[in-house]
Amino acid sequence: MEDVREAKQDGMDDWVVGRDGSASIVAATGEGLPWRWQEGDLTVTRTAAWSAPGCHLGCGVKVYTDSDGRFVKLEGDECNPFNQGRLCVRCLSFDQVVENEQRLTHPMKRARIDRGKDKWEIITWDEAYDLICSKFEEIKREYGPEAILFASGTGRDIANGMYRMAYSFGSPNIAYQQTGVACYGPRITATSIMMGNYCVPDCSMYFADRYDNPQWRPPGVIFIWGNNPLVSNADGNVGHWMVDCMKRGSKIAVVDPRLTWIASKADLFMQLRPGTDAALALAIINIMIEDGTYDHEFVENWTYGFDDLAQAAREYPAERAEEITWVPAAKIREAARMAAECSPMTMQWGLALDQTRECISGSMALVALWALTGSIDVPGGMVTTHQPFGAEIWQPPAAETFLADDIVQRRIGYHEYPLYKYSGCVVAQPDMLYDACITGEPYAIKAGWWQSTNPLSCCSQSPEDKAYRAIMNLDFNVVVDIFMTPTAMACAEVILPVATWAEKTGMRSIWYYMQPINAAVDASGIDVKSDLQINLDLGKRWAPEKWPWSTVEEFFSDQMGSSGYDYERLRDVNWMYPQFEYRKYRTGKQRADGARGFNTPTGRLEFKSTLCEQWGFESVPSYHETDRGPVSTPELMEEYPLILTTGARNWSYFHSEGRQIPRLRALRPDPIVEVHPKTAEAYGICDGNWVWVENEYGKIEMKAQTTIAVPEAVVNVDHAWWFPERDPERLFDTFSSNANQLVPPEFGSTGFGANCKSLICRIYKVSEGER
Ligand SMILES: Nc1nc2c(c(=O)[nH]1)N[C@H]1C(S)=C(S)[C@@H](COP(=O)(O)OP(=O)(O)OC[C@H]3O[C@@H](n4cnc5c(=O)[nH]c(N)nc54)[C@H](O)[C@@H]3O)O[C@H]1N2
Ligand SMILES: Nc1nc2c(c(=O)[nH]1)N[C@H]1C(S)=C(S)[C@@H](COP(=O)(O)OP(=O)(O)OC[C@H]3O[C@@H](n4cnc5c(=O)[nH]c(N)nc54)[C@H](O)[C@@H]3O)O[C@H]1N2
Ligand SMILES: [Mo]
């Protein structure tokens, strides 16, 4: 280990992850298939549905238009290897989006004094840009460029353009305003610090011929952990892939407090108490270490800190873990047996890991489990992710390539939370940023650019509507969206309307492949622009040298890394897969310097993170009891006897989207709280009753749905509700039925994590007079 220690000291502060040896060879394309053709009177265009409206996936779609370029219908593209023709209800309801009367169709402005009032004036794009530029410049002169925050929401296709534009303006304060960045960033960080890369379960998606590829094999067991893949299709993975693998023999083990559809089909279902995931993982690890069933070759040759992991896991014998997690010890033993014997084990993990306060050390326990089972980068295991061809379209550029060091270091949270730089999309610490908006400390934040986010409906509001107070305290706000939102109605001085995915040219890129988004629908009847066009227009004004492209197509051509393709060629071949190899850590392809091993300071997969050690954070996987509940706050349980989890996804909605789409609203007309029938009975509640869900932070009105899917002690509420049909000047009642009224802005020691999925509450019927 001597040489390892030396390596650790050498330049460790600047340790960079993710910029490693990405494949430069195009392995497969959709060559030979037309990207546009005629079927009778209709024109068919192959494209991808990424956003707007928002979605993580970018499924392959065929859009049918009439001779005027108007939308007629769409179908899943059965030739597209990614989704193989399958679409969800939100995509299939796109007809009601594109022609929706409530769409924003023109840039608009409103005087600051009229905030909250539905009083808008239509303006031209040039007027809008002039207004934005003069306001932003004025603030920059007085307070510096960092006084303007540039926020986007969950991962859509705007990250690259918006980050570039913000950096061109000179601000390091990119924002994603979910408390503790509690979505995906924490999982990426935990994985990156341990092994220098992110990993995904191998469902053959790296190959264009998918399940027929001879190199691939189905996972022995897929642990579905804190994720509901069929409903959420989360993090760039199509939920159907789990079913595809099941059909090919993969076993399924589910860890979820709710009996989801896939849990009902699982070989093993561990119905745990919310927030106790890390204890469960450590108990499984402990059994594997005690029984010696882990992968000795991998652990001895490729990992660092095994003894520390073993010691941490020893604290969680199965019986103790049963008390903590409610999962019977026998099931924990069965999970350990399956992880060891059903090789390779793989894992589709989810948001529940990020939405616990100490999410980094907790997620590290799950990464440790992949490593112990020898699943890393093997067929059917946990395969490492790389930007195809080193292209940056999904992952935004680093601030350092645009801004001077001293400005980068002024990013809110930069010094306090250094782990943020391992999260892929580097943002300001959101809770500190809201504090800065309110208090002016550490410095004043004066304006906000909100592109594809609706924080008033989606982000933690307590105490006392904190997000609202922060945003309203700014002098000037710009919102960029397809629909009016509570956030825009509350605070915007300028609104910029964007084109949908069917109306714009774009590019879809995720680890597995690249694919063009081809404009299919003619939007010339309305005055909208694509997100990237907006970023390009303003970027050119602020730093023309950083935007040498005259069209978005030129920009995309420049983003195609080492593939040797340009945008037009990509369009002609429909999609492009980089060459993929397994076990890259054995051949030197996992690290930028070509050395064997992992892209970490020790060159090994680190059970004990040397980066965390260096920064003074917990360095070994660990479990932290959740802040509220029967163990931490038994005294509160009399008042708030139920455990509350929020935000489990449903088919209809993508966060705050979709409430104005009739077909989607018909599927889920009201905000739902799921309650076990016995619990409902105990509180005198019937299915369909309106009830209050209340805790120390607030109360919200929800419709009770009785279901045995939740345990008796747990209730689950929808998140991000608002009512587009209600009074705009009451902000569409976004605070009346929104889970985020109940979520405190508490985050973990690393600056990551939030308590969205393990809170406490009481429920009681809304009385007649109250509705
Ligand atoms: N209590 C609780 N709260 C949660 C969660 C939870 O589980 N529980 N989940 C959290 C998570 S994981 C996330 S990621 C956040 C999401 O938070 P957000 O990303 O803010 O949520 P959305 O409602 O999806 O998006 C906001 C807006 O973007 C617009 N939009 C969609 N596509 C585009 C586009 O391409 N361009 C532009 N300009 N606009 C577009 C939509 O119309 C919508 O108004 O919410 C978080 N909030
Ligand atoms: N339809 C739809 N799809 C979406 C979204 C959407 O809003 N709607 N949002 C997108 C976004 S931004 C994200 S981040 C992903 C998230 O997608 P997922 O990772 O699937 O997240 P959730 O649906 O919030 O929760 C997944 C499961 O975790 C369970 N759970 C709750 N608490 C706990 C816990 O403490 N431990 C464990 N192990 N499980 C728990 C819930 O019961 C739920 O079944 O979905 C994406 N896809
Ligand atoms: Mo998310």
Image (cartoon, rainbow, N blue to C red):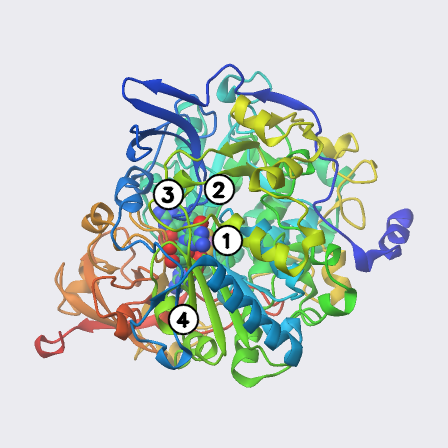
Residue 387 numbered mark, or none:
none
Can residue 231 be seen at all in this image of the molecule? yes
Residue 743 numbered mark, or none:
4
Hey, what amino acid is under mark 1?
Leu
> In the depicted view, which residue is nearer to us: 282 or 165?
165
Hey, what amino acid is under mark 2?
Ala
Q: Is the residue indicated by label 1 positioned so its CB lies within 8 Å of ligand 2? A: no
Picture quadrant where residue 670 is located: bottom left
Within 10 angstroms of label 4, few (less than 14), some, or many (20 or more) residues?
many
Q: Which residue is disc 1 drawn over?
A: 280
Report x, y in % for residue 532.
53, 48
- Compared with 43, 695 (above or below) is below
Q: Earlier in the sequence, mark 3 or mark 1?
A: 1
Label 2 – label 4 distance at C-alpha: 32 Å
Q: Is the residue indicated by label 4 positioned so its CB lies within 8 Å of ligand 1? A: yes
- Compared with 291, 274 (above or below) is below
Q: Earlier in the sequence, mark 2 or mark 4?
A: 2
Q: Residue at x 70, y 45 (%)?
A: 18
Q: Residue at x 88, y 57 (%)?
A: 9
Label 4 – label 3 distance at C-alpha: 42 Å
Report x, y in % for residue 61.
39, 30
Within 10 angstroms of label 2, few (less than 14), some, or many (20 or more) residues?
many
Q: Earlier in the sequence, mark 1 or mark 4?
A: 1
Q: Earlier in the sequence, mark 3 or mark 2?
A: 2
**Quadrant location of the C terminus in the rendered image:** bottom left
Label 2 – label 1 distance at C-alpha: 10 Å
Label 3 – label 2 distance at C-alpha: 56 Å
Nearest to viewer (mark 4 / mark 3): 3
Residue 524 numbered mark, or none:
3
Q: Secondary structure at mark 4?
A: loop
